[in-house]
Amino acid sequence: MSHSMSITMTLTKEKLRILVAILVGTAYGLTLRIGFEWSKLHPFLEIISTAFLVICPLSVGAIAVLWSAGREQISVEKQVSVSVAAMSFFLLAMFVMLLEGVICIVLVAPVFYVAAIAGGLAAGFMHNRLRAMPSTLSVSAFALLPLLMAPIDGLSPPQVTEQSVTSSIEIAAPPEQVFNKLADVRNIRPDELGFSLVHLIGLPRPIEAQMSGSGSDRVRTSRWENDVWFQEVITDWQEPSHMRWKFFIPKGAIPQDALDRHVEVGGEYFDLIDGGYELVRTASGGTQLSLTTRFANKSQLKLYGNLWGKIVLADFHQSILGLMKTRAEQ
């Protein structure tokens, strides 16, 4: 056998080993994803938890790197590339198997990739520096980490955090004129909302908001795409300075196929509390219009859930405020 042929066979075996490692990491992640959703193990296993959203991707990256290492040293570049590839396959597989929608995948992708790379680097360090430890033991240790962390998450007392998001825009129209545009907002066209990240990744767009009743009995019904609707029960109405409401989401108002249940408003993990508009007359006679929304994060991941909740609402606020500005200035 020639030297060149030997090198070719070695490279082919290495590529095959890396491919198998990526598939093993992907299969491990899918097994956890399905297992964490199994109702018989609830509440010990939670999808929206540190165990699944942080430790699971860490283990996916680590297992893929350890499986790909063989008996040789593995470079940092290879550790990163293998862990990233395994995580990409995992995310794609969840989407193809309809385990998660685009919205959830976009929301978790940043932390999944960071955790997978961290796991891959940790596993690479163990393999390169502590190779006296059997690789099977190393793989088993990483594989068990999410299962060891899960009961801690699942049995922790539930805590709800309330967060507030406020966004503002200046409108070249007096408050009286702007206020009259806020109650009833009919026939909202997609082009009036402008570019929005949350709509790009699949969240429904608002279609209309219709006010009914009078005085203290005012209720505004908001209708969105995919047959989503909810009500805003007016709690404070001072024309033309402010309008405040409590959110009311009747059972069945958000169809099951409209939003992934992990990000469903009024669902298991997140809820809208209240909100309102504030109008302030500017020195030029225009209006500074502010929109505030309070939401409750009921998930175990407070920091990450709060961060994404604020990003999503701030993005949505800008679309709505832009719509109000366009219509009030016409």
Image (tube, rainbow, N blue to C red):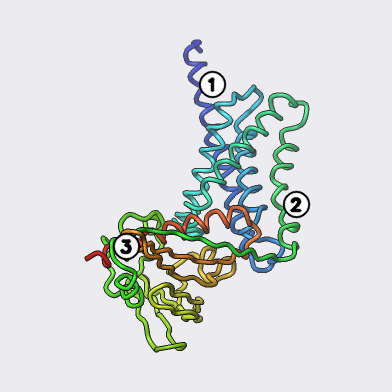
Q: Secondary structure at mark 3?
A: loop
Q: What's the mark number on residue 10?
A: 1
Numbered circles on residues, count: 3
Q: Nearer the viewer, residue 112 or 225?
A: 225
Q: Is residue 176 above or below residue 45?
A: below
Q: CA distance from mark 3 to mark 1?
A: 73 Å
Q: Is residue 22 above or below residue 129?
A: below
Q: What's the mark number on residue 148?
A: 2
Check disc 1: other Cα within 10 Å, few if <14, some if 14-19, many if 20+. few
Q: Residue at x 67, y 33 (%)?
A: 123
Q: What's the mark number on residue 286?
A: 3
Amino acid found under the numbered disc labelled 2: Leu
Q: Report if residue 252 is visible in the image.
A: no
Q: Are marks 3 and 2 in contact (CB under 8 Å)?
A: no
Q: Secondary structure at mark 2?
A: helix
With 147 as the anchor, is 278 left or right in this view?
Answer: left
Q: CA distance from mark 1 to mark 2?
A: 38 Å
Q: Residue furthest right?
A: 132
Q: Quadrant of residue 317?
A: bottom left
Q: Residue at x 45, y 54 (%)?
A: 96
Q: CA distance from mark 3 to mark 2?
A: 58 Å
